[in-house]
Image (cartoon, grey):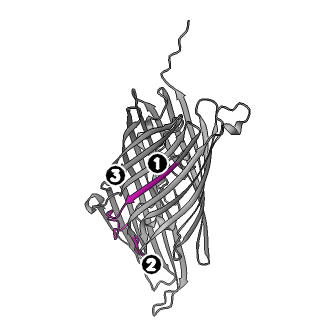
Amino acid sequence: MLSCVFAKAQTDGTYSGFSPYSVYGVGNLHTPGTAWNRGMGGVGLAARNHRFINIMNPASVTARDTLSFMADFGMNGRISLFSEGDKRALNTTFNIDDFVISFPMWNHTAFMVGINPMSDIGYKIAYSELQESNIPTGRQSFSSVGNGGVYQVFAAAAGTLWNRLSIGAQVNYCFGNINKRATMNYESDAARSWQTGDSLQVNNVTAKIGLQYEQPIARGSSLILGATYKLSTPIAGYHTHYEVKGIDKTTGRYQELLKDKNLMMGDEIGVGLSYKKGDDLLIEFDYTRTDWSRSGFDGMAGFSNRGDVTFASAVGQSFRLGAEITPNRNDIRYFLKRCTYRAGAYYDSSYYTVDGAHVDAVGITLGMTIPVFRWYNGLSIGLDFGRRGLQTSQVKETYFGFNVGMNIFDIWFKKPHYE
């Protein structure tokens, strides 16, 4: 599976995501979490649930049945409508989202390992016009195309102390390819057409720590405080730049190591507070802050654009609110009462600015989990309605996203006894 994902990131013409704002840096950062989290607006820093794997906080992996084995596999799709003045464009994408497994290690400790996307790049900008100048160039056609993305493989372990405090640590290995190409073609041979491109192979190792503290407040109810911190670490890999000019296709090329450019992944801090009532009700609010201001992307070929629009690294923020409820998990008459229903809302501010302004996004989410077979096996479905680019001068992106997740549960190490 890892080979397929890596090959997908390298294939020209394949988009793991699509947005003109993915032209900068490592592209658009993915909404964290599985289908379970996304149905609640993307919350999960303070969520503890023994029925689902929560990949947003490594400390949450201890919230599980002692002998259980758990797995989660997800897919997502998105339909986006872009508008700028009287111009319109429509695009759809569909991709594998995550694959995670989790199992206990010994008393009060547990482990999880998986892979999920960190960011995606996908855009295609083109125009054609008749140029008037002293040189008879005729009609000129310009296009700028980019694709690729960054994935992360992670492993996390956590333990619980005093039955209330859980502490976890996670190691992430990020890898991927970024490909960008710009072409200018002239109708007349009197002008020299050209093409430039950048190809980046990036990798990075970082760590994340998390904690959760659960305080009972009534019978079957509790408040949970969660927090995470992800380190800012250097980006390695290499960058290849090439130029092709003129009728004779004169080619220039150079390659450089990214470790010599002092490029950094942004650090991230998140806090969350949730109210939990048994397995039937969860309400949570999360705040996350990411600092990419020292990333070094500004002016770096392959990461930063060279057009009329100015991008710059900045500090991004997100506010998320979500809830889930199960009417009656043990109802034997009405199947729909055994399903879990979710809703949420969010506000995101990008980790970069466009001409000095952040690219903000607002949206609402809906979701549900349908029980399948026995134990905690289920099929989770989520919907995401939102809009991006709230500033008057920015390209507007109205999107409808959907995600599907399959959570698998089984009991391991159970020894039957016979008389």
Q: What is the x, y in percent for residue 17?
A: 52, 59
Circle 2 residue: 193
Where in the figure is residue 308, as x and y percent of width and height? Answer: 43, 78
Q: CA distance from mark 2 to mark 1?
A: 57 Å
Q: Residues within 10 Å of mark 2 (few under 14, many from 20)?
A: many
Q: Secondary structure at mark 3?
A: strand
* Residue type marked 1: Leu
Q: Is residue 290 magenta?
A: yes
Residue underneath mark 3:
204
First-in-chain label (2 vs 1): 2
Magenta-colored span: 284-311
- Residue 179 has which mark? none
Disc 3 and disc 1 in contact, CB within 8 angstroms: no
Query: Residue at label 1?
Result: 273
CB within 8 Å, label 2 to label 1: no
Magenta region, mostly helix, strand or loop?
loop
Residue situated furthest right in the rendering: 333
Find residue 400 and report its image quarter: bottom right
Q: Residue at x 25, y 60 (%)?
A: 260
Q: Quadrant of the C terminus?
A: top right
Can you give x and y, in whole percent of width and height, for residue 124 in the image? 52, 68
